[in-house]
Image: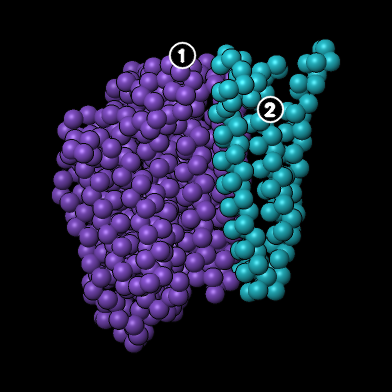
Chain colours: A purple, B cyan
């Protein structure tokens, strides 16, 4: 097997390696716990490596389709219809990169954070299964395959939320998440049935050609939008998110958050890649904008009244999801019109840049907040205080994340928000006013949290030590954040623009 | 509408009924076990939908030795149904085990009592 074959097959490795190592860790972990732990790290690193390989190849040589089964379907050979396509394009690169950064940080953080929990091998298995599931969701080019990965992600991430099953709250949050995900998955399956019944194909590219925009298509699209919006914790289906983020083991909280962002990636892929040709993009774009604005307002309002540090950040993350939906919604609403050239593309750039940005700073914020909770054993902002005296590094990391989520100028959160403001203003100034107000309230909330938890006289609350691996994981995220801050233009031209091309461009080369 | 056409729509009617019963149960029942039963009913509805879509009058099962290849139904929908049944088993098992743990921690499986996350 030459290197070129490996590069072409890199989507397989991105899915297959976490799956393989997921079960290998449990198997080996029965005999040697240390080896199981090591294998978890190796699996994560190898997956990240192949994400890097795929990204490099896509960004230098352009996208390709990796097909399991027959290369081309032909009516002569019925068996040739058994094929599953994986799409390796700019959009898949953006999504897998976002996931890989967070997964790596959360994985490294888990090493010392989860020390002392029992059944750790199963934790590693669930973690890697979730990683495989999310990567599968964003890479697949086939509707039914999407359903399978959706369910893999649901089952594994819900079990991960409820991992500390000696706490009733964790199990409660896990069950809540699970019921919603399963109902969501069933309706996704139902709408896949609606599409398959009409066109007899499941492949994105073939569906894109085939869909005529009948009433049933619109129904299927509506169901898909609602279900994936629910999984991406958009208002009005956000109620599971604060519970799941709050009660999951601290180290995987950002990872659970990234699975919901994976659903958002899938939603965008379906809207642009499959439905935008035949069903009016203006209408579906407006729905995205409405959902986005609602998420922004409700998320930030609910965050205002939270006194629990983790739930506060969870609600802020709901409101950040709103920014992405609004910006990409503006891009979708103006698609195929002259307005797309003048500001729609800029809105898309802002929205997609905000996604990768948000993945990084949200993870940083969650992990540093979890470090505080880990060190003090207190989650309530009313009782925390003066932590900065004993935890200078964590304070610095939290401050960076906080300034970034609030969009304070030099930081990368500002660059993406500025792109959104500039472009959405031309679409509708009122949306920008709402976005600005939400941004200011975000600053107030995160500022309040920072002052309450970190500043003030030393109250001697810090009892546990923050290990070096935890600091390393936050350091990695900070390094990425600093890179995004220093070179936002490079990120936009090198990663985000190919992603937009992949999202809007047709799936050429995969058709029979 | 002829009788044949009417009978062809029967499965879809059953799908609608199953999905509505399931959704009603999930939305309005307070007992966790009943909610999970509602989800199972919805799963069956979705599976029945896929199977009825695949049915073609007068066509053969897609086994390569028994018929001309032009007279066979596409087996994709059946493959989907099988996968979905397996996934349904996994999700139901996981949800039931969550319920067992909730009963152990809270002493109740009524959704009114299972809301400590918000406190």
Chain identifier of the residue bearing label 1 in the image: A
Chain identifier of the residue bearing label 2 in the image: B
Which residue sits at x=33%, y=17%? A338
Where A169 falls versus A332 (above or below)?
A: below
Q: Dot 1: what SS? A: loop
> Can residue B9 be seen at all in this image of the molecule?
yes
Mark 2 crowd level (few <14, some 14–19, many ≥20, 10 Å Cα): some
Residue pointed to by mark 2: B52
Count the marks.
2
* Alpha carbon separation for disc pair 2 and 1: 26 Å
Task: Tell me the quadrant of the picture where the N terminus of chain A can be found.
Answer: top left
Q: Residue furthest front?
A: B65
Residue pointed to by mark 1: A76
Residue A281 or residue B51, whichever sits in front: B51
Q: Residue furthest right?
A: B3
Q: Dot 2: what SS? A: helix
Which residue sits at x=54%, y=75%? A166
Where A271 falls versus A323 (above or below)?
A: above
Where A467 falls versus B45 (above or below)?
A: below
At which x and y percent is residue A246?
A: 48, 64
At which x and y percent is residue A369?
A: 36, 68
Please give left or right for residue A469 compared with residue A249 in the image: left
Residue A477's image quarter?
A: bottom left
């Amino acid at each position: 097997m030459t290197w070129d074959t490996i590069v072409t097959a890199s989507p397989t490795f991105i899915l297959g390696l976490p799956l393989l190592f997921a079960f290998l860790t449990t198997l080996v972990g029965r005999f040697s716990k240390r080896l199981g732990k090591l294998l978890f790290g190796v699996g994560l690193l190898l997956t990240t490596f192949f994400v890097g390989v795929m990204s490099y190849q896509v960004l230098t040589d352009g996208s390709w389709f990796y097909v399991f089964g027959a290369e081309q379907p032909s009516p002569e050979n019925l068996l040739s219809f058994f094929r599953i396509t994986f799409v390796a394009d700019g959009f898949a690169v953006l999504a897998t990169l976002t996931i890989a950064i967070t997964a790596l940080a959360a994985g490294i953080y888990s090493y010392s954070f989860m020390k002392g929990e029992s059944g750790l091998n199963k934790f590693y298995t669930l973690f890697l299964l979730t990683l495989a599931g999310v990567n599968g969701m964003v890479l697949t080019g086939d509707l039914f395959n999407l359903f399978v990965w959706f369910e893999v992600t649901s089952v594994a991430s819900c079990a991960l939320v409820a991992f500390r099953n000696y706490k009733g709250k964790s199990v409660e949050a896990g069950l809540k998440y699970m019921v919603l995900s399963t109902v969501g998955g069933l309706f996704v399956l139902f709408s896949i049935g609606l599409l398959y019944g009409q066109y007899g194909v499941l492949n994105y590219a073939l569906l894109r050609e085939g869909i005529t925009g009948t009433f049933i298509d619109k129904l299927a699209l509506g169901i898909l939008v609602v279900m994936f919006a629910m999984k991406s914790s958009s208002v009005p289906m956000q109620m599971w998110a604060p519970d799941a983020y709050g009660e999951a083991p601290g180290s995987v909280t950002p990872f659970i958050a990234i699975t919901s962002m994976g659903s958002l990636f899938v939603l965008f892929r379906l809207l642009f890649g499959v439905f935008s040709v035949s069903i009016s993009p203006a209408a579906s774009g407006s729905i995205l904008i409405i959902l986005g604005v609602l998420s922004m307002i409700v998320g930030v309002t609910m965050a205002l009244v939270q006194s629990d540090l983790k739930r506060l950040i969870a609600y802020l993350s709901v409101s950040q999801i709103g920014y992405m939906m609004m910006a990409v919604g503006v891009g979708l609403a103006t698609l195929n019109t002259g307005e797309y050239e003048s500001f729609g593309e800029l809105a898309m750039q802002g929205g997609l840049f905000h996604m990768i940005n948000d993945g990084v700073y949200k993870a940083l914020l969650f992990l540093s907040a979890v470090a505080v909770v880990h060190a003090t054993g207190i989650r309530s902002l009313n009782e925390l205080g003066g932590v900065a005296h004993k935890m200078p590094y964590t304070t610095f990391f939290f401050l960076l994340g906080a300034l970034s989520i609030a969009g304070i100028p030099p930081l990368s959160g500002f660059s993406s928000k500025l792109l959104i403001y500039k472009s959405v203003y031309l679409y509708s100034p009122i949306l920008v006013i709402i976005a600005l107000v939400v941004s200011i309230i975000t600053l107030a909330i995160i500022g309040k949290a920072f002052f309450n938890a970190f500043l003030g006289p030393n109250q001697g609350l810090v009892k546990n030590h923050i290990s070096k691996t935890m600091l390393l994981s936050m350091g990695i995220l900070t390094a990425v954040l600093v890179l995004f801050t220093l070179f936002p233009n490079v990120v936009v031209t090198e990663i985000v623009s190919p992603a937009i091309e992949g999202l809007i461009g047709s799936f050429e080369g995969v058709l029979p | 509408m002829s009788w044949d056409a009417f009978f062809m729509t029967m499965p879809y009617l059953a799908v609608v009924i199953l999905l509505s019963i399931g959704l009603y149960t999930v939305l309005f029942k307070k007992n966790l076990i009943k909610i999970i039963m509602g989800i199972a009913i919805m799963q069956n509805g979705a599976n029945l939908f896929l199977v009825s879509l695949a049915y073609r009058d007068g066509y053969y099962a897609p086994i390569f030795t028994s018929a001309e290849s032009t007279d066979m139904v596409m087996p994709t929908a059946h493959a989907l149904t099988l996968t979905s049944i397996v996934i349904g088993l996994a999700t139901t098992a996981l949800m039931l085990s969550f319920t067992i743990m909730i009963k152990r921690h809270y002493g109740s499986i009524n959704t009114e009592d299972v809301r400590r996350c918000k406190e």
